[in-house]
Image (cartoon, rainbow, N blue to C red):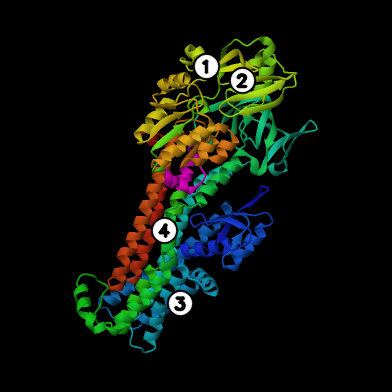
Amino acid sequence: MGAETGNENRFTFGIDGITCASCVRIVDRSLRKMPGVKFVSINLGTEKGYVITEPGVTIDDIIANINSTGYRGLAEVPGEEKIMKDFKRSRRMMIESLAVMIPLTVLMILHMTGMHLPWFPALEAAAALFVLLRPGRGVIRGAAIAAIHFHANMDSLVLMSAFFAMLTSFLNISGVEISSFGSISVMLISLHLTGRYIESHLKYNATSEIRALLAMKPRDAFIVRDGNIINIPVESITAGEIVAVRSGERVPLDARITEGSCTVDESMITGEPGRVLRKEGDELTGGTVVENGSVKAEVIRTGEDTFLARMIRLVEDAQSSKVPIQAMADRITGIFVPAIFIIAVLSGLTWWINYESFRPFLSWASSYVPWISTGTGAESTATFIFIAVLVIACPCALGLATPMALIAGSGLAARNGLLIKNGEAIQTAGSITTVFIDKTGTITEGKPSVVSHTIASEHLPVLLALENSSIHPLSSAIKEYCAGLSINPQINVSDIKETAGSGVTGILDSIEYFIGRPLDNSIYSSMMSRGETVMELRINGAAAGYISVADPVKKDSAEALTLLKQLGVRPVMLTGDSEETARAVAAATGIDDVISRVKPEEKLFRVQEVQKQGGHVCMAGDGINDAAALKAADLGIALGTGTDISIESADIIITSGRLIAVPAAISISRITFRKIRQNLFRASVYNLVAIPAAITGLMHPAVAEICMILSSISVILNSAGIRKINLQEIKK
């Protein structure tokens, strides 16, 4: 699955066969070496990859590269049907292996406790061979692929351990004086398959949010052609065509209503409960549900350009991205497997050579650990320890620590109308000390209305012509006011230029008109003290009247600012508006620090100023004048109701446009990063405890396998806990 954007190509694909961090590293390294590849991200949790390439690179090139590593690239991300098929197969393999392991384990315990069974080594050999060749054939395949391409993965280590354990049984029945560990071979394969089954189940649950988003994409739609309403696939619809949407149906694509009205459930998009009334001229977002009414609407965006497609892509990007702390884990996993293999060999040799010297220790330990025996001999003990150390060698939990938390965290965010664009934002949020917040459209509704004006009627068409070219939220109030007066500018205003944070200029009949920030705010102080924004009309530099606009404060702004303070973050209003207007809004919302009359470059300067002092800055805004500050801030949060440039500059997007989502975004990011650190700690503790235990002969290989599985499951379950959090809990 891919998209071409002119200067680059973006591809999302599936990868079959990756089972551990080593597998991910192999595929990642191979793709990065491809000519034209600019960015690579492989997610072990979802078994998906994402690349950005230069034009000319195709998905076939990507798939061919993956196949060359021994893993199988999938041009289309596996759908629900394949996922369930793979899940059922893993369950069947687990059941088959456990059906052999459980009775064999009972017999092994009887054999170890004194009930001598002379035929037991032969049974162990047969059972181990069956489990390896039947339910364990996938392990053999994975290990073979790795061996062919000169690398090791989780399957390699498990197979090597199981093979040596099985070999002892065949040597034993051949007359070689060595203990039979064939039961351990069966245990290793069975427990490995059980762990895979449990992991796949938990991974499937963890990715429910992205599947819910995908489920929102309608497959077909009703379209009006030649006066008839016909049903066609959504992929066949082009921009400009008219779709008909009835009550109970999903809006197929982003569209603008041309006829009718309806109430729409937008909760999956915005994270906000309740229904929204949409009428003629309003936009409908593809994937939302019309609950009452029926409309006809003109399609304005299709394919990858739709809001839902962009939302899905951003969630997938976040789930596939890397957090800076993961670099440490990647470095560890890069040397861990070969290092442990060397340790396993050296440990086995050391015990074999110095067995007699170590026997007193074994005698002492056998009193506390049931599986330790002092009578097995040097060869058996050395083999036992070699196998135990090998089993521990796969850093599976370490590889899952970050991606599983990112999957859960980004899913929780998406469910609440928050789109986290990259993993770095999650780590950064924890250190934020200051939040700069734009006023218009961020703290306020961004839906202003004209309160009063003194502009002569003959100048209103010029004013409308100037504001028609502006994207500032306040311009919409003037446009709406003029529309109510039926003013339609039939004039040719030239050289129209908007200066962000200042105003708009234009030339008509060699006369320069300007509408924007007043030269002297004191003239309008009484209006500004009420929270009104005053824009001054100047003709050739001379004041020619004003227009006053009021923008109501969002209902949740005061609560949002209180929550930010509770999070230990200092909120600061950063606005281009006047001091008087800014102070009035600040008083209504409880914000203490206000910086007014700032231009876009000054917003950038304020951000950089705090950063130079050692602070970490979050910028929350929605306008073109916020873009530079959003980009420069350690964490940029854009309200989805804002401009495209502000959205592109941000790290987190709030689709609902509500300010209360800013503290929620910071909280979710902090929770997710805390889970990542917990996961890394758990994975590290397992290895720090298990490796010395195995080297000293205290760790049974089967116990090592169980511990490894439990370590991975612990990481996944800890990450899954994020999904249980709701926005109301975060507010508390």
- Relative to 585, does residue 664 appear above or below in the rendering? below
From this view, report whether residue 489 is shown above or below residue 612: above
Magenta segment includes 90 = no
Amino acid at circle 1: Asp
Of helix, strand and loop, which one carries label 3? helix
Q: Kindly report the secondary structure that dominates the magenta region of the rendered protein.
A: helix
Q: Of the two numbered discs 1 and 3 on the same chain, state the one appearing first in sequence.
A: 3
- Regarding residue 100, the answer to whether it shows in the image is no
Write down the quadrant of residue 298 in the picture.
top right
Above or below — where is 75 with respect to 248?
below
Disc with the residue nearer the chain's start (4 vs 3): 3
Confirm or deny contact between disc 2 and disc 1 (CB under 8 A).
no
Please give the range of residues in magenta: 407-428
Q: Residue at x 70, y 36 (%)?
A: 222
> Disc 4 marks which residue?
328
Is 279 situated above or below 567? above
Q: Nearer the viewer, residue 710 or 668?
A: 668
Mark linked to residue 520: 1
Which of the 4 quarters of the picture holds residue 123? bottom left
